[in-house]
Image (tube, rainbow, N blue to C red):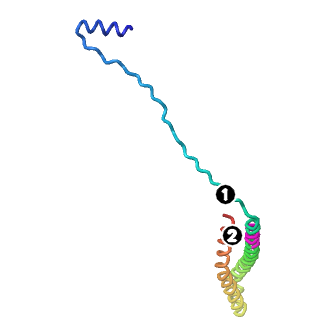
Amino acid sequence: KLREKEAQANKNKGIPQQPKEIVIEKKPDIVVAKVEAVVSAPIIEGQAKNNTSEFKEKQKEEKRIRNKFSKLEADIALLNEEKNKLEALLADPDTYSNKNQFQTTENNYKSVALKLELLQPEYETLFEQLMQYES
């Protein structure tokens, strides 16, 4: 009311009035949510047996690959150990003094290095297969 009296007095004096503040209440927006439900089909008894059978086959295959991988890993470890021994012998000056011993040691070293080189691709393939089973 005080503002109204001031506005009336200013109007009588010829002072322009300031616009009144208009307060508008904002109503909350209406949100419509769409909910979709996924309903799975009932499992038929034959399908359940089939899924179990597939699961067992996959487990069996994974176990076979793990066993093969473990054996291959052990073989590679033994070959690396043998390679290190042969490298030490080749670094020994006494090996060079005996021509036959040097040739035998060098041939053994080449053989072990070749075996390791041939096992590496199989090792990598088995490793990748195991990673697929774990993911």
- Give the magenta part as a residue range: 51-60
Number of the front mark, 2 or 1 = 1
Q: Which residue is at a point 66% across and 86% down the rendered structure image?
A: 110
Which numbered disc covers residue 40? 1
Residue shown at 67% from the left, 79% from the top: 122
Tell me the quadrant of the picture where the N terminus can be found.
top left
Of helix, strand and loop, which one carries label 1?
loop
- Identify residue for label 2: 130
Amino acid bearing label 1: Ser
In the picture provided, is 51 more to the left or to the right than 31?
right
- Which x, y percent locates residue 31? 51, 39
Q: Which residue lies furthest to the bottom in this view?
A: 100
Helix, strand or loop at label 2? It is helix
Q: Toward the viewer: 110 or 11?
A: 11
Task: From the viewer's side, name the closer residue of 52 and 62.
Answer: 52
Q: Earlier in the sequence, mark 2 or mark 1?
A: 1
| Label 1 crowd bin: few (<14), some (14–19), many (20+), radius 10 Å | few
Q: Which class describes the residues within 10 Å of circle 2: few (<14), some (14-19), or many (20+)?
A: some
Name the main secondary structure of what is drawn in magenta.
helix
Q: Position of residue 25 (x, y in %)?
A: 44, 25
Above/below status of 3 relative to 76: above
Compute the Cα span from label 2 to label 1. 31 Å
